[in-house]
Image: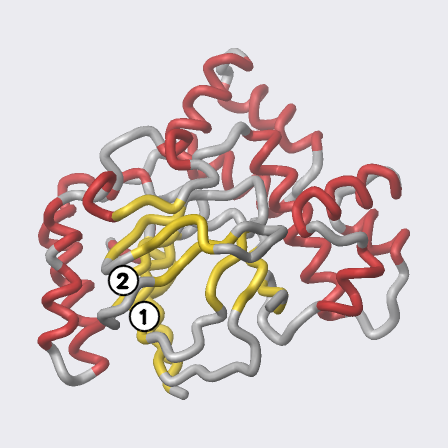
Amino acid sequence: MIFEIYIPSFPLNQFIESFIYYRDYNPIHTVDRFLPDGNVNIVIDLTDYPKFIYDNDTLKEIQTCRNVWFSGIRNNYITIPSGKDSEMFIINFHKGKAYPFVQMPLHELTDSVVDGELVLTNEIMELREMILEIPLLLQKFLTVENFLVKKFSKKLIVNPFIDFAVNKIINSPNQLSIEQISRKVGYSQKHLIKIFKDNVGLTPKGFLKVNRFQKAIAEIASAKKIDWTAIAFESGYYDQAHFINDFKAFSGFTPNQYLLKQYEHLNYIPVG
């Protein structure tokens, strides 16, 4: 298997966390449940056959994806191919930082996987052909980086409000964070929600809940001994009931069920 991560340099690294390339991944399963992780991605498929999204319950094909697609931030889990026999180039944005590259408010793409040509600029759509023509992996990374900087240089301007609000919620995923954000920026609650939804894709409360869940599964993965009360508290939950309800909503499993099903890759659960 080839799996490589490339970190772009400034100014692109303010918005893009990494480029990921992989091929020849051959797990024994073919279908994953992908859990909400707070991220937004552009997926460039370098093979010539379609990929599918499946019904969460029946695992029947419900959507076809080809060439390039945009995967919006999620409130709900989704069922996707495991990556078996794929060759992919993925643009992985920092949380809340995809807004310079998309032509519409991010909340219109929440819980959606959309064909690239419907939401991305023509410039990004050209990337697939460029990547396919370049033989060396490092050169693929550098070409994409240079291309994006050149085409989007005028849009690579950080929104300080979004930067502050997103980081505050990620670093401290509890209700107090939203109250502190409101006081700090001086916006009304209605205006705060609108700006956040347009640029991130979720309301501040929705984004907080996803990040609280993410902190919980990271705590589970690193724990030597499972203490559900401690995990719930460390993840920003004030009681077990909210912890269990959120956990089941975001994963489809209770915490105990998840513990038995967790996989080597965080946020991916084999289901078929």
Q: Quadrant of the rendered structure where residue 51 is?
A: bottom left
Numbered disc 2: secondary structure: strand
Residue at 82%, 55% in the rendered image: 231
Residue at 15%, 60% in the rendered image: 127
Please give left or right for residue 209 compared with residue 140 in the image.
right
Image quadrant where one finds the N terminus: bottom left
Q: Do the numbered discs 1 and 2 sit on residues whose CB atoms are within 8 Å?
A: yes
Residue 217 image position (x, y, % from top left):
70, 59
Please give left or right for residue 167 compared with residue 16 in the image.
right
**Residue under circle 1?**
88
Give the number of marks: 2
**Residue under circle 2?**
44
In the image, what residue type sits under mark 1? Met
User: Badge 2, how many Cα within 10 Å: few under 14, some, many 20+?
Assistant: many
Please give left or right for residue 243 compared with residue 152 in the image.
right
Residue at 74%, 49% in the rendered image: 235
Q: Front-most of 121 and 184?
A: 121
Please give left or right for residue 56 compared with residue 46 in the image.
right
Q: Quadrant of the rendered structure where residue 44 is?
A: bottom left
Q: Please, is residue 225 above or below residue 65 in the view?
A: below
Q: Please, is residue 184 above or below residue 60 in the view?
A: above
Q: Mark 1 or mark 2: which comes first in sequence?
A: 2
Image quadrant where one finds the C terminus: bottom right
Residue 82 image position (x, y, % from top left):
49, 70
Residue at 11%, 50% in the rendered image: 123
In the image, what residue type sits under mark 2? Ile
Q: Front-most of 233 and 11?
A: 233
Q: Please, is residue 170 above or below residue 264 in the view?
A: above
